[in-house]
Image: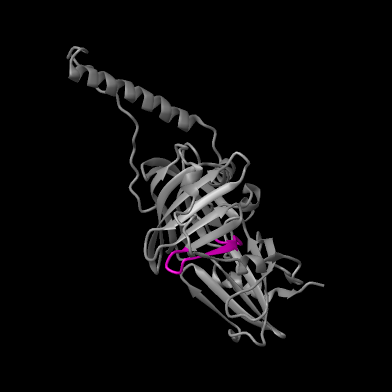
Amino acid sequence: MFGIEFVNEAGVAPRPSSTPPSSGVGRKALFLLGMSVVLSVWSAAVVAQPKNVNEWLDRIAKSAKDLPYTGVYVHQTAEGSTTSRVTHLVDKQGNEHEKLEMLDGPLFEVVRRNEEMYCYRPDQKTVRIDRRATGRFFPSLVSGSPVNILDTYKVKLGQIERVAGHDCQWVILEPKDGMRYLQKLCAELGTGLLLRARLYNEKNQLLEQFMFTQIDVSGGVTRQDIRSRWEKSPGWQKDYSVRDSLKSADTGWQVGNPPAGFRKVMEMVRNLNGRKEPVAHLVYSDGLLNVSVFVEPSAGNSVQASAHSTEDGSISVAIRPLADFQVTVMGEVPVGTVQVIADNVSRRR
């Protein structure tokens, strides 16, 4: 079902041995017997735990934000794959810290404290300070409440499998309409941390996959682990221009009739490269997938286009001229979804 062979790992007790327990072989047999009993009891306890889709979705969302963890994961799309290391910690004051290190290509690090991000580029000796707006940041892919998600997805539990040395529970989210994609999430049994995630289009073709290849959830992460290696390097320039341009505000724009389940989760004004004037930015989410809406003046900007829509892998984009403005909608949703949203953008009265 998932393209992975399911392995039954239930413990089986070895047959009694006539070898005296005092010998090495006898002690090993007793050890294996004891481990067999422990594993059997542990497995029974896991199976006996009352679990339903609501609890799994809630646990997946909370574990990614609350747990200390560090691991290496692979992100795969049609364009290829990248490897990253993520380290996560919540301090005693409740602040969330995260460090993301790109392990492929040019050196690059992102260190986040709550919503503020520090993007380190050693090739330019520049750290750009930004604010997280939206996007799918593995393993924090579930942002909405289970109740809202169940309004637009049919959710069921799949098999229990192994990922990066950990047992994980598959949670399958089938869209109830054509406005969103099928998703399959595999969460670690003990913690609920997402270990693997797959996104499929309407033809059941794999669009995107995140998967941990190494993961440590033992809780040994320290504050030093989430600091950049270039934090105290001399001669670096700090660029605050992007962060300082972000302003949570009533932009005056709205999506009058968004697709079912999509709710506005963010609204701001920000500067974008190539634009002479600030751009209105609205973010809509169904609790799993996000869609960004950008509205900018048409005159004077380097990017001007007629109405059209495109689909590139998991990303769909729709552009629509609107009087003296240009509307751009993009997100990891079907192209029909961004078209509907673009067509419903209007001035708020």
- For the view shown, which residue lies furthest in the right direction? 349
Q: Quadrant of residue 306?
A: bottom right
Q: Is residue 127 magenta?
A: yes
Residue 258 location, x and y as percent?
Answer: 68, 67
The answer to which of 172 and 297 lies nearer the viewer is: 297
- For the view shown, which residue lies furthest in the front direction? 234
Residue 56 location, x and y as percent?
Answer: 55, 43
Q: Is residue 193 visible?
A: no
- Tally the numbered discs: 0
The answer to which of 184 and 297 lies nearer the viewer is: 297
Residue at 34% from the left image edge and 35% from the top image edge: 9
Q: Quadrant of residue 218?
A: top left
Residue 103 location, x and y as percent?
Answer: 38, 58
The answer to which of 220 and 322 lies nearer the viewer is: 220
Residue at 62% from the left image edge and 80% from the top image edge: 275
Colour option used:
one colour
Decide: is 120 above or below 14.
below
Q: Quadrant of residue 42?
A: top left
On the rendered image, what quadrant is the C terminus found in? bottom right
Q: Is residue 65 visible?
A: yes
Decide: is 185 above or below 277.
above
The answer to which of 94 and 250 lies nearer the viewer is: 94
Residue at 60% from the left image edge and 79% from the top image edge: 319
Give, as a single range, the part of the protein colored magenta. 121-135
Residue 241 location, x and y as percent?
Answer: 61, 69
Q: Is residue 86 magenta?
A: no
